[in-house]
Image: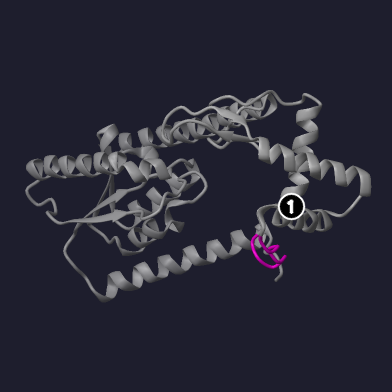
Amino acid sequence: MKKITNKEWLRRRAERALLDLDQCRQSEEESPRPPIVWGYIRCSHQDSKDSGLGEDAQHNMTIRWAELLRSEKPHFPKEIVWCQEDDPVSAYKVQFRFRPVGRKLFRNAREGDHVIFAYLDRVFRNTEDCLTTLREFKRRGIIAHFVNLRIDMDSAIGEYMITIMAASAQMDSKMKSERIKEVLAGLAVKGRMANGHAPMGFKLSGHKGKRRAAVCDREARRIMGEIVRVRDKHRWSWDEISNYVENWLAEQEGRKPTPVWEKRKWPAYRCQKAYDAELALRNGKHETPQAG
């Protein structure tokens, strides 16, 4: 399969966006309906998704804001159509109109509708995405609200504030990403756990869910040492070493060797990783990992 270049990928996304706009205009002309309120909810990480706290907060904020507007404007739509992303999705990497649920909202919202976002950074982490989407909303007569900022896009000051805050959200996202990368790189150099998993040659002790320490896995180190020995002595390929390790372990455990086409505990790529990890431990390039 031929790999799609970045230029071609951007061209296809632009064409799909234009197609969405054409479908929006066609649906508005063919089937008019009363204005409604859209409530958009998104989480960026699986742990936030699992807890449900972030989504519940956005849900409650949207309802309270709609009730406030309804008390001030008697003709404000009563129906709220919820648009909640089923899976975690990055607002920085994936533009609003290309997210599964965001695209549905973008296509189905019509003139006179209101779109309520609990937080600006829950929907936009990219300035260009924010301005492009909101300008299209305004052109189509759709009013966007941001509850945490207490503003909407139905005024000049609202547009100004959103532009400034969208740029700040993008900068904040980039700075967080840079800090996380620096921390993880520092942990890797020190041999500490950066992702909650013990590095090769170690295993986690203690109960799951608590602060756990990584301790030496003697069985894994024994196998890693044997991989280094046969590699340095015989100069075998990684596939040959994988077959050797599998036959060696099968004989010790009294079972039949696992065929190469089935899932092995020590496939070729893991043997190569084990070789490098064992040499690094022997040469003192990594410290004993600690609890993350």
Q: Which residue is mark 1?
A: 269
Q: Main secondary structure of the magenta part?
A: loop
Q: Is residue 276 magenta?
A: no
Q: Give the residue displayed 42% in from the left and 30% down from the top.
A: 210
Q: Tell me the amino acid under the disc marked 1.
A: Tyr
Residue situated in front as seen by the camera: 178 or 253: 253
Q: Is residue 131 left or right of residue 108?
A: right
Q: Position of residue 178 (x, y in %)?
A: 59, 30
Tell me the SS state at disc 1: helix
Q: Is residue 94 left or right of residue 153?
A: right
In this picture the colour scheme is one colour
- The vertical placement of 139 against 278, above or below, is below
The image quadrant of residue 53 is top left
Indicate whether 139 appears above or below 181. below
Residue displayed at 65% across by 63% down: 8
Q: Position of residue 121 (x, y in %)?
A: 39, 38
Foreground of the two, 248 or 217: 248
Q: Which residues are magenta?
A: 255-263
5 sits to left or right of 124: right
Badge 1: how crowded within 10 Å, few (<14), some, or many (20+)?
few
**At which x and y percent is residue 89?**
44, 49
Could you tell whether 228 is left or right of 109 in the image? right
Image height of 189 relative to 13, above or below: above
Q: Quadrant of the N terminus?
A: bottom right
